[in-house]
Image: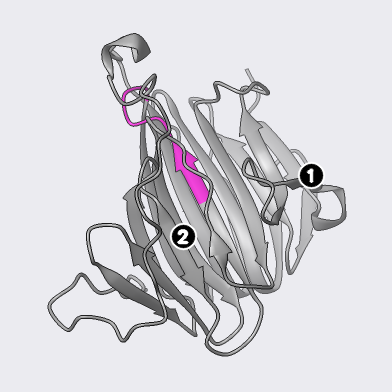
């Protein structure tokens, strides 16, 4: 069976409103194509101070793609600032999160996944030589090219420009090679072998009541969690 390879050009991302109607996102891919998805990758366009939509039952990981800074305020008092270049932070999708733009509009890569059905890992990698993807049972990869250019050697050659994405699932005997130069976000998405029933997660069906919105404009608490640094190459 040949490898699963799907090129996702940036100009084909679907632009839609946030769940709370307070912003816009460009959806790269949702699996499956349903409200009760297992995972979803998108690019949020944030042009004003606002609140993120709540997604009980999901984890979220965000990476600053464009812009200088995004300040996040959480209802438990945490204050986290994502700064250029490409800082990231992971949090519970059920949390009420306010965002403040201290230096103008930003764009944020946003990965959401159901941790009961999927193990997800988000890596930031420079693309300075061949990147090889080998088959693993139940594992898919999503590559988002943030800058530069790349090409995939598999079933011919696929070319990627900055902003494009690529969904990969190597099959036994495959050796998919991505070459080029630039920077990429690489998502490892592994289906859980024995997923718990979604209904067993009480937060999935919990009422989406909102506590008082936090104010992210206050300076971050030095003791609060800081965004994780990009992984080394």
- Between 98 and 67, the residue placed more toward the observer is 98
Which residue is located at x 76 percent, y 45 percent? 7
Instruction: Decide if residue 146 is on the left or right side of residue 225.
Output: right
CA neighbours of label 1 inside 10 A, class few (<14), some (14 to 19), many (20+): few
Magenta stretch: give its range.
111-117
The image position of residue 154, as x and y in percent, is 69, 43
Question: Sequence-wise, which precedes: disc 1 or disc 2?
Answer: 2
The image position of residue 163, as x and y in percent, is 73, 64
Residue lying at the far front of the rendered structure:
212
Secondary element at tag 2: strand
Which residue is located at x 25 percent, y 67 percent? 78
Secondary element at tag 1: loop
- In the picture shown, does residue 192 fall above or below 112? above
- Between 83 and 136, the residue placed more toward the observer is 83
Q: Locate residue 159: give its quadrant.
A: bottom right
Please give the residue where the numbered disc 1 appears in the rendered image.
156
- In the picture shown, does residue 42 fall above or below 129? above
């Amino acid at each position: 069976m040949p490898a699963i390879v799907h090129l996702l050009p940036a100009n084909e991302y679907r632009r839609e409103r946030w769940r709370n109607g307070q912003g816009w996102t460009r959806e790269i891919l949702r699996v499956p194509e349903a409200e009760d998805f297992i995972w979803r990758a998108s690019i949020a366009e944030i042009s004003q101070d606002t609140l993120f939509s709540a997604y009980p039952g999901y984890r979220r990981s965000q990476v600053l793609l464009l812009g200088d800074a995004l300040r996040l305020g959480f209802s438990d008092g945490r204050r986290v600032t994502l700064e250029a270049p490409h800082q990231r932070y992971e949090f519970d999708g059920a949390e009420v999160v306010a965002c403040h733009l201290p230096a103008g509009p930003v764009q944020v890569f946003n990965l959401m996944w159901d941790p009961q059905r999927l193990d997800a890992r988000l890596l930031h990698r420079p693309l300075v030589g061949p990147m090889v993807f080998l088959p693993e049972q139940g594992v898919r990869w999503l590559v988002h090219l943030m800058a530069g250019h790349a090409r995939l050697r598999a079933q011919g050659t696929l070319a990627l420009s900055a902003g494009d994405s690529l969904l990969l699932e190597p099959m036994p005997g495959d050796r998919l090679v991505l070459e080029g130069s630039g920077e990429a976000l690489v998502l490892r998405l592994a289906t859980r072998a024995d997923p718990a029933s979604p209904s067993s997660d009480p937060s999935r069906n919990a009422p989406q009541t909102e506590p008082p919105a936090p104010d992210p404009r206050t300076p971050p608490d030095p003791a609060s969690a800081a965004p994780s640094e990009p992984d080394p190459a």
